[in-house]
Amino acid sequence: MSNTLVLRPGHVTLAQWRQVYRGAPLALDPAALPVVRASAAAVAAIVAKGAPVYGINTGFGKLASVRIEREDLATLQRNIVLSHAAGVGEPMPASVVRLMMALKLVSLAQGASGIREETLLLLEAMLVKGVLPVVPAQGSVGASGDLAPLSHLASVMLGVGEAFIGDERLPAADALARAGLQPIELGAKEGLALLNGTQFSTAYALAGLFEIETVFQAALVTGALSVEAAKGSDTPFDPRIHAIRGQRGQIATAATLRTLMQGSDIRESHRDNDVRVQDPYCLRCQPQVMGAALDILRQAATTLEIEANGVSDNPLVFTDTGEALSGGNFHAEPVAFAADMLAMAVCEIGSISERRLAMLVDPALSGLPAFLTPRPGLNSGFMIPQVTAAALVSENKQRAYPASVDSIPTSANQEDHVSMSAHGARRLMQMAENAANVIGIELLAAAQGCDFHAPLRSSAALETVRATLRAQVPTLEEDRYFHPDMVTATNLVRSGALAQGLTDLLPTVEPQA
C-alpha cells in the first residue's frame, strides 16, 4: 500500500490529481469519515423534524414546492438518479471517469453533502476495484450540477446501467458482483448529493489541462529545434529583454529556449556576419506567445485545483447548526472560464507551431531546400504534412470559441443561466490531440532541417531529442509513405518522451507562489 495515493479531502494537490488521471492506485483518507457521519446525522435530524427542506423531503428544480412524505424519501432519491440519467453520445474515456469519481469522492467526504458512510465507501471501493461506470459524454449544461453524467455514475451504485471492468462492459449489477460489491439503496439527500456538482466538467478540464501541459512542453522543444533548423538567432531569448517587460511566463519560456540551445554548433556557425537582422515572429516571439500561454495554463490550473477541492453540491449541510442551506455552488462558471482559457492557449500553441513549420518548408524564408526534401520536384517532401497541420490548426480555431458566453434556460426556466462548462471542457482533449499532431509534424520538419546542416550539430539537449526521433524515423531522403512517420512523432509528443531528461528545465502548469 506504500504506493497508494491517499486523498485528503480539501487538500489534494494538482500533482496528485494528475496521478489519479494517470491511473495511480488511491484511497480516501479515513480521517474524513467522522465528518461524513456527522453530516448524515444532520440530515437524519432534518428528516425527523419533518419541516420541508429542499433536496431532502421536496421535489427538485421546478418541483421544489412539492412536499415528499417520509415513507417515499428512498424512492425519491432513486427516482432522481434514474430519471436524470439521460446522457447521450460515446462513453467518457476511462481515465476521465476515474478522475470524475475521485473528484466526487473527495467532495462528498468533506461532510457537507449529508451522504452516509456506506455510500461513500461504495464509491471508494468502485475506484479501488476498477468498476468504472459507462457515462455518455453529452448532456450537461454545466449548471445545477453535471446532472446527466453524474446520474449515470450514481445509477451504477444502484445496480442500474452499465460499467467497465478493465476492457469488459457489463450490466452494472454484474460488474459490482464481479468486484465483490453490492448495490445500495439511497437514503435522504443522497441521490441529489451524488448527481449535483461540477465533477464531470472539472474532470474533463483537468484532463485537458494535463494533456495540454504535455503538448506545451513538447512545443518548447520543437520550437527551439526549429530555430536551429532555420539557423535563427537566440538573441530574442536574452533574459534582459524579458526582465524589462516582467511577464512571468515569458521570462520562464525564454530561459527554457535559451538553455535548450546552449552550446549549439549550428548557432555558433552564423553568430557573426549574418546578413539577417531579425527572424520571423514565429521564431523570435516564442517567449511572448508561449509565455502568455503558460501564464494562462497556470491561471486555469489554479482555478481547477480550487474547484477540485471544493464542494459544489446543493443544498449544503452545515453540521455545526444542523442547517441545510440552498445556494448555487453547482454553477460551473469558474470551470467554464478555465476551460475557455485552456482552449485559447492550446489553439495558439498549435498555431505558432504551424507557422514555424510553414516557414521551414518555404526556401525563401528558411534557406533550406523546398519542402525539406533534397530533390524537390521529383519529391514533395513536407508539402502535405504542412497542409495537414494547417487543417488541424483551423479546426482548433473553430473549437476555441468560448463556451462560457453561451447560455440556454432549462428546467422550465428555473435554471435560467447556465455555464456550458461541460462541452467547453470536453473539447479540450481533442484540441490537445490536434495540437499534438501539429507539434509532431514540426518535430519531423525541424529534425529534417537540422539534418541539412551536418556535420554541424545542435546543443546536447536538442541532439538527444533528435536522436530519440531518429531511432524510430530516419531522415527523409526520398518520398515515402509519410503517415507512419507522423504517427510515431505524435506519439513521442503525447507520451512526454521529448521532455525526458529535461524535467528541471521545462516549465509546468503548477500554480506559482
Image: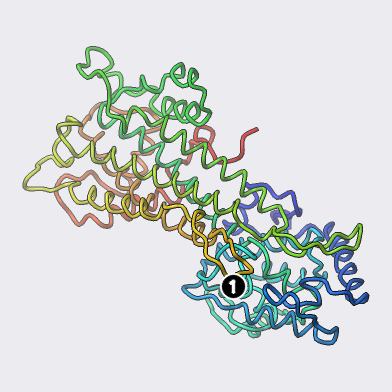
**Residue 399 or residue 350, whichever sits in front:** 399
Quadrant the N terminus occupies? bottom right
Task: Give 447 or 134, whichever is nearer the viewer.
Answer: 134
Residue at image position (47%, 55%) is: 428
Query: Which residue is identified by label 1?
Result: 148
Please tell me whether residue 334 is drawn above or below residue 156 in the rendered image.
above
Q: Is residue 322 above or below residue 243?
A: below
- Residue 299 relative to residue 398: left or right: right
Q: Residue at x 55, y 49 (%)?
A: 338
Q: Is residue 345 left or right of residue 82?
A: left
In the rendered view, tell whether residue 247 sits above or below residue 97. Answer: above
Which quadrant would the C terminus be assigned to in this image? top right
- Residue 68 relative to residue 330: left or right: right
User: How many discs mark residues in the rendered view?
Assistant: 1
Q: Quadrant of residue 219?
A: top left
What is the basis of the colouring in this image?
rainbow
Q: Return the x and y of residue 254 as percentages of the image width and height.
A: 44, 27
Q: Residue at x 52, y 65 (%)?
A: 408
Q: Quadrant of residue 326?
A: bottom right
**Coordinates of residue 323 in the picture (x, y in percent):** 87, 63
> Which residue type does callout 1 highlight?
Ala
Other-residue count near label 1 (Cα within 10 Å), few / some / many at <14 / 14–19 / ≥20: many
Q: Viewer-proximal residue, 270 or 98? A: 98
Residue 116, x across and y down, in percent:
82, 71
Q: Position of residue 337 (x, y in %)?
A: 55, 49
Taking the image as shown, residue 133 lies to the left or right of residue 325, namely left
